Amino acid sequence: MLLPVTPENLVRAAEALRAGELVAFPTETVYGLGASALNVEAVASIFEAKGRPHFDPLIVHVADAGAASLYAQRFPPLAVALAEQFWPGPLTLVLPKRTRGGADVVIPDLVTAGLPTVALRVPAHPVALELLRLARVPVAAPSANRFGGVSPTTAQHVYEELGDQPAVILDAGPCTTGVESTVVSLVEPNKPTVLRLGGLPLEALSEAVGEISVARGVLDADEQNAQAQVGKLSPGMLDRHYAPRTPLHVIEAAGVWPPVEGARVGLLAFEPVSADVRERYAAVEVLSATGDLHEAAATLFAAMRRLDGANLTMIHAERVPDQGLGRAINDRLRRASTR
Ligand code: TXA
Ligand code: MG
């Protein structure tokens, strides 16, 4: 059920989480489909609702770094530094999982897909933080879409994807960041490694920690070996993902393609296009009127969904500048286009 954010509805959502029900909630990145991470049956219903394979582990959301440290075996100095600088925020830290100490601190294997690690995040959204505080349980939450599809950035998107499967969908309007969190592994405590590009730009990370490595296959996703490699590190990064139903092709610049006879081609453009280019396409979505990468990230998934609903033969998606949030945008475009 779609509910507006009120104090009563927040309490109701928190109680639903404590009772083992599913709650979809806003974060600054995308909407999440949450369940108590300590309740295996509730977590199982996340996988069921999404049609998500069990080898793909979930991120555990908590209200602060203190809570995060409960579920990790170690919280090394670099994790403390990153948490201090970027939490709450679009950063997920992968750390060795606590395996002893009782059912209230050991995150079940179903959440982590049997890995010896756990992914932890403190989202920067007042509604998410209030919900986590009220629920008093860690909340496992993937993006609230069907597996492989486009992540939801509004509560309406969640409803279109999952209907009434969540007991509550908290509606707090569109997400401001618009792409998922950046996932960083600290399994080697002094060698931070990026497993997924996302809402926290690489530049900000390397400014904070000096050199940061990027797992093979994250930057060059179409290379077979590299894909297998990153698949082992971060199972959810495999293959086609974030994809609309309409075939999507990444192009370097709009307008260089001759019109295709009988085809309805849509354009996902970074910046405004000329009338001449617009004419060639059956539908055009512009991500940012001013060529701003933050705005483009925030509007990306909603624009993809609109084009997907426009009865098109194919979508041309323009690559954006490969810097800041542009890297995450290009990553999502490339994965959306993998057949
Ligand atoms: O912004 C986000 O991260 C959103 C919001 C809701 O927080 N969540 C999200 O979750 O995008 P999901 O499940 O769609 O993506 C989680 C990613 C997957 O690629 C998964 O493989 C990876 O995180 N992941 C989770 N646990 C992991 C672990 N223990 N080791 C390596 N990768 C992990
Ligand atoms: Mg997802």
Image (spheres, helix red, strand yellow):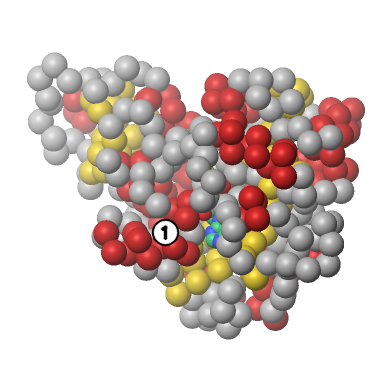
Residue depicted at x 55% and y 34%: 50
- Seen from the viewer's position, the closer of residues 32 and 20 is 20
Is any part of residue 200 visible from this angle?
no
Residue type highlighted by circle 1: Gly
Q: Quadrant of residue 311?
A: top left
Whole-percent x and y of residue 7? Answer: 88, 31
Question: On the image, numbered disc 1 is attached to which residue?
Answer: 231
Left or right of residue 250, residue 107 in this image: right
Badge 1 marks a residue whose secondary structure is: helix
Whole-percent x and y of residue 208? Answer: 59, 75
Whole-percent x and y of residue 239? Answer: 36, 49
Residue 234 vs 129, above or below: the answer is below
Residue depicted at x 58% and y 54%: 113
Count of marks overlaid on the render: 1
Residue depicted at x 56% and y 69%: 185
Residue 250 vs 12, above or below: the answer is below
Residue 169 vs 54, above or below: the answer is above
Left or right of residue 261, residue 140 in this image: right
Is any part of residue 78 visible from this angle?
yes
Q: Quadrant of residue 44?
A: top right
Residue depicted at x 65% and y 78%: 78
- Seen from the viewer's position, the closer of residues 23 and 156 is 23
Whole-percent x and y of residue 192? Answer: 54, 75
- Answer yes or no: disc 1 within 8 Å of ligand 1: no
Left or right of residue 225, residue 236 in this image: right
Q: Looking at the figure, which quarter contains the C terminus?
A: top left
Q: Looking at the figure, which quarter contains the N terminus?
A: top right
- Seen from the viewer's position, the closer of residues 149 and 332 is 149
Disc 1 crowd rating (10 Å Cα; few below 14, some 14-19, many 20+) is some
Left or right of residue 150, residue 99 in this image: right
